Structure formats: C-alpha cells, structure tokens
Image (spheres, coloured by chain):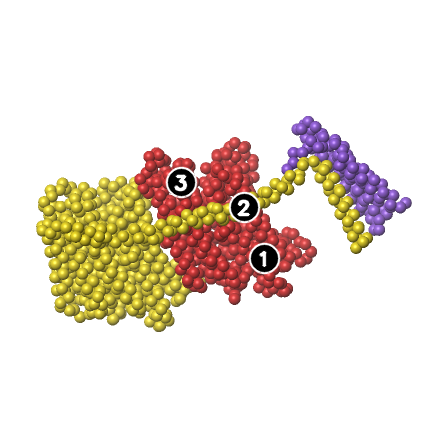
C-alpha cells in the first residue's frame, strides 16, 4: 500500500491552518481560531499515529517520496520525505505535543488580543517542525531548521511591546544563527565534495571511503555546531533561558519538547557520520557532558520558575548529547522522547502555576500552593519525579540507559559528571517543587481551566509510563535500529548503575527537602558561606557579560571606527576629488571676462602666432 | 584673369570683417562684420570653383548654400539681438558679459 | 520574420506611449497623471510576461533577435540596432516591468510637477528595459545613459533635503563609470569592428587578428570599473548611500531594485561573457572585494542610526554576495548571482516602499525615535518583518535561495573564503533584526499611538512583492529554468 499521501496529510493541515489564520486574522473569532488550530494538529496527530502503526507493523522503513525542486549544475535537487523509524517517532512526538499545546493555549492565551496571530505562529511552527523531521536531505533539513528558528523568534517576541521580549527574541535568533552557519557551511561543503544533499548519498560516500577522515571530522563538527546552536549547548546556550520571555505554551512546545531537541535529532539522524569520526564523537560527548553539569549548577541558583526549567532543559539536552557521543544512539533518542513528555508537562504545569498565582514567576514569592491546588501539585510532582529519575517514571529508564552507555563506552570521567548532574537535577527540581508547593503561604489563586489541565494529565500519564517501551523488552531499540545500524545495539545492562542513579537522585531530593521543604537547613547560610560561588551561579558564570564585552562591544566599536573611516576617509577622498576639480574650474573661470570680442581677439592673435610659428618652422627647420 | 586678385579681394574683405568683429562696440555692426567675413569666404569658394586646380560646379553650389545659411544666421542673430536689447536695454557688445566667470 | 522578433523593441519603447498621452494632458491634473503613469507601466509588464511565455528555455543564445544595420562606416565598421533576450536578461526584464509598475503605484507620494515626473519616470523605464534587451554594447551604452539622465533629474527635482548634492554625485560618479565604458567600447570597436554581443564573444574566442594582451586587459578593467561603480563595489559606494537616503521613495525602489542590478548584469554580460578567462585570473581580487563588501557593509549597517542608511549599507553587503557568486565562475555561483539580483531587487524595492510609507506618517526614520510601531501599524510592521526576514535570508523567501546558491558556487572552488563570507550571514541577521525590531518592537511612544495603518494602495503592491518573494523562495524553478542554458554556455566558454 502506498503511503505517500499520508505524509502530506500530516504536514498540510498545520500549513493550511497557518494560511487560513493569516488571511482571516481580522475575522476569525478566538473560538474558531483555536478550533482550527486544534483540529489541524489533531489531524496531523492521527495520521502520524497511522504512520507509526504501519511502521511498527512492517518493521522496515516506509517508502520514501521525492520531487525535484531545483536543478543545480545539471544535478536535480530534490524535496521529499523519508520515514525511517526515527522520523516516524519524531513525527509522533511533535504532533502529539503540538496538539496538546494547542489545546492548552486556548486556555492560557484566552485574554490575549493577538490570539489568532499566536495560533498562526504555532501552526507554522508545527508545520516546519514536522517538515524538519521527515527531511531526507540536508538542504531540506536546513530550510525547515531555519523556519523553526524563525517561528521560535516570532513566538519569543510575541509580546513585542516588552523590551525584554524584544531582546530575547533578537538574541534567540542571532545566537542560533551562529550555529546555523556551521550547518550551512557543512551542507555547502558536502555538496561541493559529493555533489548531493541527500543523506543516503553522503552515507554511501562515507561507506565507500570517498571522504578522508579529516573531511568527515570537519563535516561532523560543523553539523554539530548547528546542533549546538539549536539545542542550547555550551557555548551557545545563552539564548534558551532568555527565550522564556515568550508565552509559556511556547516554552513548552518549542523550547522544551521539540525545537531544541532538533539538534539532538540532527545528530541522531546523521549518526553514521559522527560514528565515522572518533574526534567528533569525543567533541559531542564532552560538550554534552559539560553542558549537562554546567547548566545544572546554574539551575540551582535561579529564581524564575521558567528559567530554572530552561536551564534544566539545557542540562537534559546536554545529557542526550552525552549519550549520542558515547554511542548511546537509542539512549539519546529515548531520552529525547521521555524528556519531551516530562519537560512539556513541567512547563505546562509551570504555566498553570503562573496563571493561578496571577502571573507571578519569582519562586521566592511563591509557596503553599499544594493546599490550594492538589491536582496541579500532583502533576508537577510527576514531572519532577520523572526528570529526577525515580522509578517507575520514564525519566529513570532513559537516564539509566544514558549512564549505562557512557559507562560502557569507557568514558568514566563523563560518567561521574553525569551522576553528579543527576544529583543536581534532582536537587534543583525539588527545590523548585518545594518552593512553589510547600510552605505555610496562603496564596490567592485563580482557577486553572480544564483546557489547560487536560493536556497536562495526558502528558503526566505519558511521563509516567513511557519508560516501559524500552523496559523490560527493549521494544524501542528493536524498532529504531531496524534501519540497519547493527552497531547501535545498546550495551548489556549493569545492575549497579540504576541503583546508583536512584540513590543519587534520592539524595538530591532529600537535600532539597531539608533545605526548602522543612527549612531545616537555611539555604541563605549556604549561599553566604561561599558568596562568590553563589554570585557566579546567579549571574550564570558571567557568560552573557563575557559575550557582551568580548563580541558585541568590539563589534560596535569596530563599526563606529569603520563609520568614521567610511565618512571621512572614503567619502572624504571622493569629496576631495570633487573639490580639486572645483578649484581648478574656479581658477579657469576667472579668465572668462564675458567679453566675446576679447575672446575673438585672443583667438585671432593665437592663430596668427600659430601660423607664423609653423611657417617659421618650415623656413628654418 | 588671375586667381590672385580674387583672393586678395577676399582677404581684404575678411580682414575688414575681422577688424569690425573685434573692435566695433555696437553689436549690430559686429553682425554686419560677420556677414563681410562670410562673403569673403564665398568669394574664395567661387574663385576656386572657376580658377582652382580642379574647377567644378560644386564650389558655386556650396557658396549658394552658404549665402542661404548666412541669411538665416543673420535673421537669427538679429532676433537674438532684439531680444537682448529688450532685456538689457543696450546693444553695446561689451555690456553683454553675463557669461563672466 | 515572426512577430516575437518585435517583442524586445515593443517592450522597450512601450512606455513612450504613456509619455505621449501624458504630454497631452493639462499640467495641473495630478490624479490623471498618476493614473496614466500607472497604466503606462502595464504594457511593458504584460509584454514581458508574454515574452516569458514565449521564451524557449532550451535555446542557446539570444532569442527573438532583431538586427537592423544602423550605422555603417566603410564595410568593416558596422553598428546595428539589435535587440534580443536570453536567459540572463529574461528575469531582469520581468523584474524591471514589475518593479516599475509598483514604483509607479508608489509614486502617489509625489505631489509636485507630476507631468514631468511621470514623463521622466517612463523614460527611465525605457532606459532600463533597453539596457537589458539591447544586443550590442553601443545600444546598451545609449540606454544606460538614458537611465542616468532620467534618474538624475528624478532625484534632483523630487528628492528630499540634500537632493541636489545626491543627484550631482550620482551623475558624476556614474558619468565616470560611463566614461570608462565608452573608452572600452571605442577600443573594442576599433579592434573588432563590431559591438554585437555574440560577435565580440566569438572574436574573443578566436582572436583572429593578433592583439596585445595589455590592450585587452585595459578594456576589461575599464568595463570592470564601470560596472563596479554601478554595483557598487567598495570603495566606489559612497554615491549610492546619498542616493538611497535622498531619492524619493519610488525612485529609490527602482534604483536599488533595478539600477544597481545593471551593474551586475554588465559584469555578467561583459565580464563573464566576453572576458571570462580574464575574469578567472583576477577571481581572487573579486572574491576579496566581495568579502570586503559583505563584511564592510554589514558592520556599517549595524551601527547606523537611520533606517534608510541601514538599508543602503545592507545593499552593499548583499551586492557583495552577488559579487562572490560571479567571482566563483561556476554555474551555481552565477545562477546565485542572477537569483540574488532578482531577489534583492524585489526585497529592496519592498523595503524602501515600506520605509517610504513609514516616513509619510512619522516624518522620521531615525531608529532611536521610532519604536513599538507594531501596535499602531500592525500590517506595515508585519510586512516589514517579512521583508526583514527575506533580507536576512530566511528559507521559503527568495533571499535564502539566492544567497545559498551564490555561496554554494564559491564553496565549490574556494571553501575557505566562502566560509569567511558566511559570517556575513550572521551579521545580516544582526543588523536586519536590530533595525526591524527597533522600529516595530518595544514599547510604543505616545506620539506614534495615533498613526494610521497603511491603505490598500500601499499594501496591495507590498503584498504583490511579498508574493513574488515567497514564490521564488518556494518554487525557484520558475526562475531557474530560463537561465540554465545561458549559464552552461557561459561557463563552458570561460575555459582555463
């Protein structure tokens, strides 16, 4: 059976919804808009589930489909669809989370006057993200890659009148753009080398040994730079926390579950390229590991509920990169999936907390919400337990797989880093939980509508049970690597690693409980004991400041310098040329007295002199 | 007849015209002098057409052309002069110095 | 003889019909002139469309060619009136038709001396169409000069504050370029006895009579300088900054949309087409100049305090990308250069139209005084955002495909330089977003609260431009098919 058009059914509804909303910006009511949005992503979800089922059933990749978009140098450049298990999995994750966020947004954004605009951006994002995950070639990936980036930019800057939102949007776009240029260079160089953008051609070229190992490493690292930008890895992580200026559903959809995971997806999708270069694998593993612990430490000291979650996202993405760098292909993708569920849940729950506390985001001013809204508390708790890696929640299984593959890969240093990061994660997540829900506060709360609670419940269920697709049967692994990559079988499990992980997480949780749950240990005293460290963490290791003074200011200064040069030297030279001609002309013009007869006399005299001198030359010469 | 005498006449006429163009203050006189110079040229043309090394009719034709053009030129010149007179109230050639640099 | 032979001539001179009609109208009927002016730009557009539909994209060389001997000196020297179209000029002809029509619509901003304005405007269009459709250098030169003179008066009379200076500088600078072109033309004519594109090209290939290479180098460099000034290439760019700031909106649309592209066209037609081998020898210099243009323009655009100046410097930066595409001398790079010419023509016309509409309302384009306009003018801000995204090369819009191809071409030959140039893409995002966000985002100032959003006569042309930008971005085949064959032939002639 031909499934080609099925993919279009997944892709097109959000695009149509986008066009419809842009065209009918003025006439669509909020109810209609949200209906269209939910319906379109719902259709996408249904058909991606159909694709999932058929992919599971057939056990092999579905037929691909392509058409020629452009001809370059007599080579056809194609657009198409590929449906490997990884693509199908991403398709389901994206359409599912997007569907839930569409529902959620109808409650969260109901008072916003640019409701339709918001939904149209969301629809465009969904379309682009779906397009990204089914792309069979690098050019198509890059196109959708940029499109999701711009949607993220538009949505971060959705509340355009806020100066912070404006700054954050600009930063989000530019910092990710820096990464994108890496990807751009990689794509262009790959095309220049092998004359194709197709991933399978690249794969074929590598397998045939057409590329030198230096080239492969270069390509892999350039592609990874793109992933670093998108997935907020160090040193391009700074945009992601700032992106929390956008509406919370956006943070859940784009900056937690889908787009930021695109970097991880990209690396996973071109995993054979990375595997061909051990240097590239090392780079991924170390960058990922460093990011995981780096962001986790910053997360400890932040006070904005969304920023804590953002840093935790950065840290978890680092985890996934660490897994991929340690040949833990399945572990990385598995964590990507579980993270999409529990982090989306956490963000949506955080949004609900923000709504119920009348748009308060500072956790220092929160507390005691448990008594007011137990349901929300439970949902949040499930998310926290999942991310902290407590069995049987999904985060436990995926994190265990990651640690296992890191250990099995022989990266013991990074293994320890991973364990510490797990401890820190558990600690700051429960710090957040206790700060918000525990305590004797009696906050005034607003009601959380059902449209918001419903999606959270779905995500909570998924966060709780999603781990079991890989345990105890390794179902996910079997499916994911049907495409052929035999080398990607996960290592044999080692019993003490999950035990260690759970112990460490429990330690983190108990520490958080002691410090923030029952206030037995005063956190301020800890901060005062090492004030420089605390300050350093609050200011996020001064990375932003460093960029500002090392890159932005010099660029500005250089710009002003060039401005002076352009205005006074280049233009000055031009003006000088003009001025000199003018002066010469002025001098010449004083000779003109306006007396035509004088001119005639001078001409005659000169003529006579000329003739005479010519004759004289004849006579005497 | 020798060509020399024609040429001498033409030269004298031309010189008188040239003198007039350069020295006369009245612009009308300047125009007349230009006519003299043109006619000197016409005499030359006709003379060469008759007694030149390659006598041919085209010299006479040319001179007729030039007489016609001279007539047109005189008309235009006088017209410009009248316009100038209306504008500046004088026909003194050295008062026309608005092209001074 | 087929009727399509007459198409190039018809297209070129069809705006003159409008000039005749406008001359017959009384001087003070501005509205009538406006209507006439807009209608008069329709025939070339329609004819250009017909030409596109008649265009045979598999045919090598000039199509719909018409040649009539015009001036003949002895038997050897001959100049003919010859017009024709090939893959290189086809997109630009259509672009000219389109942007002229939209600029004519945008000319509602002109309120004084409309009769002369529209006459000159249409004359300018004749010149531009002629430049792209001429089939020998002599005709090219004549049409080139027509655009110069017409643009000079249009800027000098209807410009903003410092208009005379801008117009003067424009004329002098471009006159200098024309001088070089004239020099090259005379020398070539002396050598070859023809100025026909194809004949000169064949002569260059065969070099039947021995010619000193120095002389050819001088001719080549003269042509290069002539078009470098037009493009403009650093350090010949200062004239166009003034022009961009002082010229009236419709003229600046045409100027940055088409007139600059005549420089690119000249470089492609004469530089690559005639002197391909010479071009190859100095490719390094061209690449270096292209990189300087990109980075210099980008850094300067970043620190400008005025919207038009940002756009002016961004044009320099984008023309640098175009130059890189040309300098790569690969099919893809040249394709990218043509794409960039068309795409930047559309985008910058759109941008300047938006800025013109903005200026009509705010009477300022100082970035520090603007801000938050998205609140009072959502439609204008939305289009400005789209235009900005197109300018910085967002996929799905035409800016991406052109920049991508230009860089891809360079990556095939000099990846290291291309990688340096890609920094310009980051900088493009930096300065474009800075300008766009400073204008539309942030808290709105009280004085802008009451501004009225754009009306149909403004947004309709803008939407048409956006439509074309998106069309080329989504379906580049539309543009690519007609230019392929010409480019293959061009590149194959470059040789070693």
* Disc 3 target residue: C366
Whole-percent x, y for residue C302 in the image: 39, 48
- In depth, the one of C419 and A127 nearer the eye is C419
Which chain: yellow?
A: A
**Residue under the point 44% across and 63% down:** C414
Whole-percent x, y for residue A538 in the image: 22, 51
Q: Is residue C418 depicted above or below C443 in this figure?
A: below
* Disc 2 target residue: A576
In what quadrant of the picture does the N terminus of chain A appear?
bottom left
Residue C139 can be seen, yes or no: no
**Residue under the point 29% across and 57% down:** A235
Mark pair 2, 1: CA separation = 27 Å
Q: Residues within 10 Å of mark 3 (few under 14, many from 20)?
A: some
Q: Are marks 3 and 2 in contact (CB under 8 Å)?
A: no
Q: Earlier in the sequence, mark 3 or mark 1?
A: 1
Q: In the figure, what tint was chain B given? A: purple
- Secondary element at image label 2: helix
Which chain: red?
A: C
Whole-percent x, y for residue A481 in the image: 24, 67
- Secondary element at image label 3: loop
In what quadrant of the picture does the C terminus of chain A appear?
bottom right
- In depth, the one of B40 and A457 nearer the eye is B40
* Disc 1 target residue: C219
Displayed quadrant of residue B46: top right
Label 3 is found on which chain of the structure?
C
């Amino acid at each position: 059976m031909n499934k080609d058009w099925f993919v279009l059914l997944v892709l097109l509804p959000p695009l149509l919804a986008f066009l419809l909303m842009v065209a009918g910006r003025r006439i669509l009511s909020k109810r209609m808009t949200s209906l269209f949005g939910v319906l379109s992503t719902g259709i996408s979800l249904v058909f991606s589930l159909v694709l999932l089922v058929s992919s599971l059933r057939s056990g092999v990749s579905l037929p691909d489909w392509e058409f020629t978009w452009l001809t370059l140098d007599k080579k056809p450049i194609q657009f198409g669809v590929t449906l490997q298990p990884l693509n199908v999995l991403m398709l389901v994750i994206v359409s599912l989370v997007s569907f839930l966020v569409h529902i959620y947004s109808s409650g969260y954004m109901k008072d916003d006057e640019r409701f339709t605009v918001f939904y149209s951006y969301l629809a465009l994002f969904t379309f682009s993200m779906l397009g990204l995950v089914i792309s069979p070639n690098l050019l198509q990936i890059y196109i959708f890659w940029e499109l999701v980036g711009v949607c993220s930019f538009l949505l971060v800057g959705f509340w355009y009148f806020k100066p912070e939102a404006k700054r954050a949007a600009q930063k989000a776009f530019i910092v990710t753009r820096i990464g994108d240029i890496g990807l751009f260079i990689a794509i262009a160089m790959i095309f220049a080398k092998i004359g194709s953008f197709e991933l399978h051609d690249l794969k074929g070229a590598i397998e045939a040994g057409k590329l030198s190992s230096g080239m492969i490493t270069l390509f892999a690292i350039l592609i990874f730079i793109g992933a670093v930008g998108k997935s907020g890895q160090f040193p391009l992580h700074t945009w992601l926390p700032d992106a929390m200026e956008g509406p919370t559903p956006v943070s859940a959809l784009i900056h937690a579950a889908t787009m930021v995971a695109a970097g991880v997806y990209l690396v996973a999708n071109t995993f054979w390229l990375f595997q061909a270069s051990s240097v590239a694998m090392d780079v991924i593993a170390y960058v990922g590991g460093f990011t995981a612990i780096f962001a986790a430490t910053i997360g400890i000291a932040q006070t904005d509920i969304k920023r804590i979650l953002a840093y935790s996202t950065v840290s978890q993405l680092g985890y996934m990169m660490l897994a991929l760098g340690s040949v833990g292909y399945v572990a990385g993708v598995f964590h990507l999936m579980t993270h999409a569920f529990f982090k989306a849940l956490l963000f949506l729950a955080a949004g609900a907390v923000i709504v119920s506390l009348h748009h308060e985001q500072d956790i220092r001013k929160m507390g005691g919400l448990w008594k007011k809204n137990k349901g929300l508390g439970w949902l949040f708790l499930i998310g926290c337990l999942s991310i902290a890696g407590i069995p049987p929640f999904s985060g436990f299984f995926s994190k265990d797989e990651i640690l296992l593959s890191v250990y099995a890969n022989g990266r013991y240093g990074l293994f320890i880093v991973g364990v510490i990061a797990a401890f820190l994660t558990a600690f700051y997540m429960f710090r957040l939980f206790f700060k918000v829900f525990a305590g004797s506060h009696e906050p005034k709360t607003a009601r959380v509508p059902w449209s918001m609670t419903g999606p959270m419940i779905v995500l909570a269920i998924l966060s709780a049970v999603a781990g079991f697709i890989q345990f105890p049967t390794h179902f996910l692994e079997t499916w994911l690597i049907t495409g052929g990559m035999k080398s990607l079988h996960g290592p044999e499990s080692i019993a003490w690693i999950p035990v260690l992980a759970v112990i460490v997480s429990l330690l983190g949780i108990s520490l958080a409980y002691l410090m923030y749950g029952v206030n037995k240990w005063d956190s301020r005293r800890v901060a005062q004991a090492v004030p420089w460290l605390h300050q350093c963490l609050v200011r996020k290791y001064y990375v932003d400041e460093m960029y500002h003074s090392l890159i932005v200011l010099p660029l500005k200064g250089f710009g002003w310098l060039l401005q002076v040069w352009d205005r006074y030297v280049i233009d000055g030279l031009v003006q000088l040329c003009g001025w000199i001609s003018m002066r010469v002309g002025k001098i010449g013009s004083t000779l003109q007295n306006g007396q035509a007869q004088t001119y005639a006399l001078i001409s005659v005299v000169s003529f006579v002199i000329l003739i005479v001198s010519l004759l004289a030359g004849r006579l005497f010469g | 007849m020798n060509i020399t005498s024609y040429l001498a006449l033409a030269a004298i006429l031309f010189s008188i015209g040239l003198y007039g163009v350069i020295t006369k203050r009245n612009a009308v006189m300047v125009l007349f002098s230009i006519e003299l110079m043109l006619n000197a040229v016409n005499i030359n043309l006709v003379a060469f057409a008759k007694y030149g090394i390659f006598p041919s009719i085209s010299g006479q034709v040319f001179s007729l052309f030039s007489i016609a053009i001279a007539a047109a030129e005189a008309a235009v010149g006088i017209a410009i002069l009248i316009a100038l007179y209306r504008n500046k109230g004088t026909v003194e050639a050295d008062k026309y110095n608005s092209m001074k640099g | 003889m087929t009727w399509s032979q007459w198409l190039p001539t018809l297209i070129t001179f069809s705006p003159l019909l409008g000039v005749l009609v406008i001359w017959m109208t009384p001087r003070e009927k501005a509205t009538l002139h406006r209507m006439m002016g807009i209608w008069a730009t329709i025939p070339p557009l329609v004819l250009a469309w017909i030409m596109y539909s008649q265009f045979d994209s598999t045919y090598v060389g000039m199509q719909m060619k018409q040649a009539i001997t015009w001036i003949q000196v002895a038997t050897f020297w001959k100049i003919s009136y010859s017009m024709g179209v090939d893959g290189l000029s086809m997109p630009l002809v259509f672009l000219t038709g389109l942007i002229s029509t939209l600029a004519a619509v945008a000319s509602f901003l002109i309120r004084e001396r409309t009769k002369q304005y529209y006459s000159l405007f249409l004359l300018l269009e004749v010149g531009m169409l002629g430049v792209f459709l001429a089939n020998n250098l002599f005709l090219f030169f004549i049409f080139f000069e027509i655009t110069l003179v017409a643009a000079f008066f249009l800027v000098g009379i209807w410009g903003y504050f410092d208009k005379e200076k801008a117009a003067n500088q424009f004329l002098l600078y471009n006159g200098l370029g024309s001088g070089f072109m004239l020099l090259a033309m005379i020398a070539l004519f002396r050598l070859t006895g023809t100025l026909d594109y194809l004949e000169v090209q064949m002569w260059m290939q065969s070099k039947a009579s021995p010619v000193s290479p120095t002389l050819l180098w001088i001719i080549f460099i003269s042509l290069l300088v002539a078009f470098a000034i037009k493009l403009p290439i650093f350090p010949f760019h200062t004239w166009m900054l003034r022009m961009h700031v002082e010229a009236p909106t419709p003229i600046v649309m045409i100027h940055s949309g088409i007139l600059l592209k005549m420089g690119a066209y000249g470089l492609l037609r004469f530089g690559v087409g005639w002197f391909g081998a010479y071009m190859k020898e100095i490719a390094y210099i061209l690449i270096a100049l292209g990189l300087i243009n990109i980075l210099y323009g980008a850094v300067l655009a970043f620190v400008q305090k005025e919207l038009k100046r940002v756009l002016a410097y961004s044009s320099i930066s984008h023309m640098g990308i175009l130059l890189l595409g040309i300098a790569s001398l690969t099919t893809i790079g040249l394709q990218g250069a043509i794409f960039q010419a068309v795409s930047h023509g559309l985008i910058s016309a759109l941008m300047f139209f938006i800025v013109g509409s903005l200026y009509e309302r705010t009477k300022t384009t100082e970035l520090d005084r603007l801000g938050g306009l998205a609140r009072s003018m959502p439609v204008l801000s939305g289009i400005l955002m789209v235009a900005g995204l197109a300018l910085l090369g967002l996929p799905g819009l035409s800016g991406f495909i052109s920049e991508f191809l230009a860089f891809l071409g360079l990556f095939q030959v000099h990846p290291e330089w291309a990688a340096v140039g890609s920094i310009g893409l980051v900088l493009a995002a930096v300065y474009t977003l800075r300008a766009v966000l400073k204008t539309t985002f942030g808290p709105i100032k009280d004085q802008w609260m009451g501004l009225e959003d754009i009306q149909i006569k403004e947004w309709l042309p803008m939407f048409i431009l956006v439509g074309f930008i998106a069309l080329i971005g989504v379906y580049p085949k539309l543009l690519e098919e007609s230019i392929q064959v010409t480019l293959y032939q061009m590149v194959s002639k470059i040789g070693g």
